[in-house]
Amino acid sequence: MSGPAPGGASDAEDRQSLEQWILTTRLADYVAWGRKNSLWPMPMGLACCAIELMAMVAPRYDVARFGAEALRFSPRQADLMIVAGTVTKKMAPAVKRIFDQMPEPKWVISMGACASSGGMFRSYPVVQGVDEIIPVDVYVPGCPPRPEALIEGVMKVQQLVDEGARTARGGTRPERRVPAAGTR
Amino acid sequence: MPLSGTPVRRPGRPGLLELTYLPSILKGMWITLRHMFRRKVTMQYPEERWTLPENYRGLPALVRDEEGRVKCVACFLCEYVCPPKAIHIEAQEIDTGVEKGPRIFDINMLRCIMCGYCEEVCPEQAIFLTKEYTTVGVSREEMIYPKEKLLEMGGVRPDPIKKWGRLTPRPADGGRVDAPAGAGSSVTR
């Protein structure tokens, strides 16, 4: 319908009444909405942080309210990896491999001091931050972080999922940043 | 040797009723139903928050005294005691002429384990653990908190000792510096 309407106000009124009945969205927005509200975490529990990770899923904090309660122990079915705990050099190849087995699109939360930076384990058998082997999207500090902090991290990932879809529509996927070697 | 206790017998073959699984299903449903009328335990996190105990240890932060001075004197004790070596300090002279102060005071929050040793060791009571526990970041650089940010987080804590009043020359009384309490008492005796 084009052409000048006899009254501009009535045209706007028509549109308003139409919008009450028809839900319009772009496909990318719709997909992002679905993705962000059904994140399936892969619990990469390596140390004590995993206890808090379990607490987050348990009824008290109940991450099901954010749609992320379906913890998948198979990386093929997960899209959010939560690295919870100290990543030793012995475990690092397994973590890397499990990340590689997850289908795109995928996100990573690095939970706690050890996973994020090595924490107090400044020593030869510990990877100084899991972001040295896999790209991390959200860092949650704490030793261990409270379940609320991890929920905050999941909410941040949801926000990134939303924004990521917006960027993908423009043709540029947000580039995964490699951390600088000097910032330890 | 006499045996103690009696071994458990294997359960017998299930009856016809049990083979229909109905009793087990109903039993399970009954448990679910009972839980529906119990008190709800879920904390609705972003709206509802836990009441923190008085001595909760969250992220560390620097504080100012009530006159706006940075209380930290860059003594490096916290940097020394920090188990994960999360603190990085570089000192500078400050214009009072008595103490020094931090030029750079960075805390890597990804390293920090909130142990509270820095607060415990600080002779100036300049670093405190706040009750902040839900911070998240999207990059390593973002999680290294500079001095300005730490001071903003810490806010003001009144200084009960009033050290600066004694140490710094005041223009009102002609720049005279009072001897700090305790120092030189053995000389005058």
Image (tube, grey):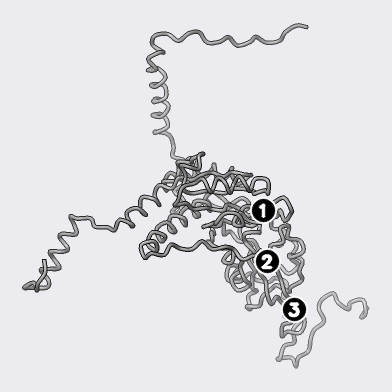
Q: Do the residues bearing badges 2 and 1 touch, measured as CB atoms within 8 Å?
A: no
Mark 1: secondary structure: loop
Q: Residue at x 61, y 66 (%)?
A: A180
In the rendered structure, the answer to whether residue A62 lies left or right of residue A3 reads right
**Residue at mark 2 shares a chain with residue at mark 1:** no
Q: Is B49 situated left or right of B123 in this image? A: left
The percent position of residue B136, horizontal first and vertical second, equals: 53, 59
The residue under the point 40% across, 25% down is B30
Q: Amino acid at mark 2?
A: Ile
Badge 2: few (under 14), some or many (20 or more) residues near its Cα, within 10 Å?
Answer: many
Coordinates of residue B154 in the picture (x, y in percent): 60, 68
Residue A27: mark: none
The residue wearing badge 1 is A127
Q: Which circle, 2 or 1, is nearer the viewer?
A: 1
Q: Which residue is mark 2?
A: B127
As rendered, which of B55 and B118 lies closer to the eye? B118
Residue B151 seen in render: yes
Q: Position of residue B91 (x, y in %)?
A: 73, 76
Measure the alpha-carbon separation of dots 2 and 3.
16 Å
Chain of the residue under label 1: A
| x 42%, y 60%: residue | A164
Q: CA distance from mark 3 to mark 1?
A: 37 Å
Name which residue lies at 66% across and 56% down: A128
Q: Quadrant of the N terminus of chain A?
A: bottom left
* Residue in front for this viewpoint, B153 or A127: A127
Q: Amino acid at mark 3?
A: Lys
Task: Decide which of tag 2 and tag 3 comes sooner along the chain.
Answer: 3
- Name the residue beneath numbered marker 3: B100
Which chain does tag 2 point to?
A: B
Q: Residues within 10 Å of mark 3 (few under 14, many from 20)?
A: some
Q: Is residue A155 left or right of residue A82?
A: left
Residue furthest out toward the left = A6
